[in-house]
Amino acid sequence: MRLAARLLRNLSRPFSTTTIMHQLTPASLNPAVLNVEYAVRGELAIKAEDYRNKLKEEDHGLPFDRIISSNIGNPQQKGLDQPPITFVRQIAALMEYPALSTLAPSAFPPDVLARASELQHEIGSIGAYSHSQGVPFIRQNVAKFIAERDGFTQANPNKSYTDFSDPNAIFLTAGASSGVSLLLSMLIASQNDGILIPIPQYPLYTATIAQFQGKPIPYYLSSSTQAGWSTSVKDVREALQKAKDEGINPKALVVINPGNPTGSVLDRATMEDLVRVCEEHSLVLLADEVYQDNLHLRVKDPSVSFTSFKKVLHDLSSPASLISFHSTSKGVLGECGRRGGYFECTNISPEVLALIYKMVSVGLCPPLQGQIAVDTLVRPPQKGEESYSLWKEETDTIHKALAERTGVMSERLNKLEGVTCYPSPGALYLFPEITLSDKAVQTAKTKGKAPDAMYALELLDETGICVVPGSGFGQKQGVWHYRLTCLCPGVEEYVGKLEKFHKGWVERYGV
Ligand SMILES: Cc1ncc(COP(=O)(O)O)c(C=O)c1O
């Protein structure tokens, strides 16, 4: 009966021989989408996820019993389990559920209760949209942090922090990625517009440039056993000239400092030269400084400090346009899922700021929990406050673990035949270079894989360790790498597995 009713209903619908319904296909999408590639979550990560599911079966038959996610800088991910900083979570909890301050006051130190109450007073409910640019009070705190970090406050006790960093030129974001994406979407006006990017680079840049149909202008980073990875300003200039000769219109220069995937930290002279290049060619300097708190040398020598492009611009009295990005995902907070970050605009005209404001307001506002995390990033507990000692202990422990693991890993990997692991003084990664034999390269070719992707896949198949092949970040022709993070606990077991795998690889393919 029901079937008959449905048939009748269908027959009674207007019938046209010309209407053929087409479902969405990739070919009907914006072609730029098809060109986007993002290796950090690519083939390797997908296969690792399949293995993770298989491991739940009793008879999984895999030669390992867990997946080690060394492919992504996601410190709190299951298996990596970097503990969140208590202060950050206490503030988040009180902002989420303010009644906790009366229901469980003893669960929170007085400074946390006071801080949360201050934020509640400024923000109100975190269920409401905020100012599109981010809560003004939090932006003020970001500006104060920048002025202090860069030594302006100390050097100019009679001046206001706003003389250095203007809260109205700061935009809070859902992680650094959304800021980068917005700025690139605004900068790329035609398919001829180019963005200078380091190679190897974090694939956010190539992916976003592809999405907005601009041209990546690669400048290659150099590597040497002594100096590690470095940026040659001569190479940047050559890349710029070559692009111009090809009719490309360079709009911006991306610098990642400390570097991903290289872990390098720029020296002051190079930073100054890069600023000069931007001045000469009217390039916007996009400074990705999300790893500014990951300086491993600081563990041994607390006087080691991060130099921001903001400071360099200020010291040079440079008129160059700068946009600097920071995030709550890295450093020791590792609050990747909370999606907090900001960008600061320097030497950007009020008209352009107004347009950036217009564009961010289309998205209404960045997530409030992300904004609150930014506040804890830029306003950690101070000496004398109740939360200080625990905060210090927790952050020191993480810095120490990251530095130690980086040291152990690079030392042991460097001893392997055909592996060169350059010093990695910052960020969360090592980027060893691997010599691959002709046999390995030919075998990879027959499998339709990049040789370092084949290395990474076999590593995953044998050990459960998931890394990202260097081809996902770009590298010089015929040079092979992989990137691994320094976030995995149990470094002895982990490096032991890497060593065993590599020796087996050398037996199979030679070097
Ligand atoms: C260099 C660099 N920039 C930006 C990001 C994006 O970070 P998020 O969007 O989580 O702030 C990452 C993430 O790994 C990164 O490595």
Image (spheres, grey):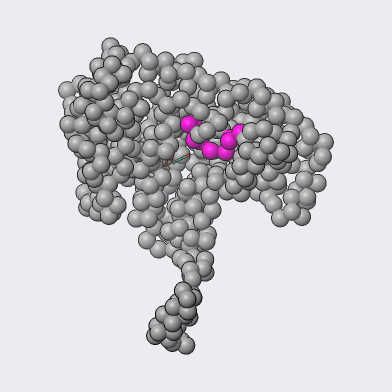
* 134 drawn magenta: no
Q: Is residue 481 visible?
A: no
Residue 238 relative to residue 15: left or right:
right
Indicate the position of residue 139 as horizontal and vertical percent values: 25, 36
Span of residues in magenta:
68-76
**Residue at the image position 43 percent from the left and 47 percent from the top:** 253
Residue at 49% over, 27% down? 82
Query: Vertical placement of 84 versus 253: above or below?
Result: above
**Magenta stretch prevailing secondary structure:** loop
What residue appears at the point 52 percent right and 24 percent down from the top-left corner? 402
Picture quadrant of residue 276: top left
Q: Quadrant of ligand 1?
A: top left
Examine the rendering and report whether any part of residue 354 can be seen. yes
As drawn, 122 above or below 154? below
Q: Is residue 190 left or right of residue 168?
A: right
Front one among 68 and 12: 12
Which residue shows up at 24% across the image and 45% down it?
A: 129
- Relative depth, front residue between 445 and 149: 445
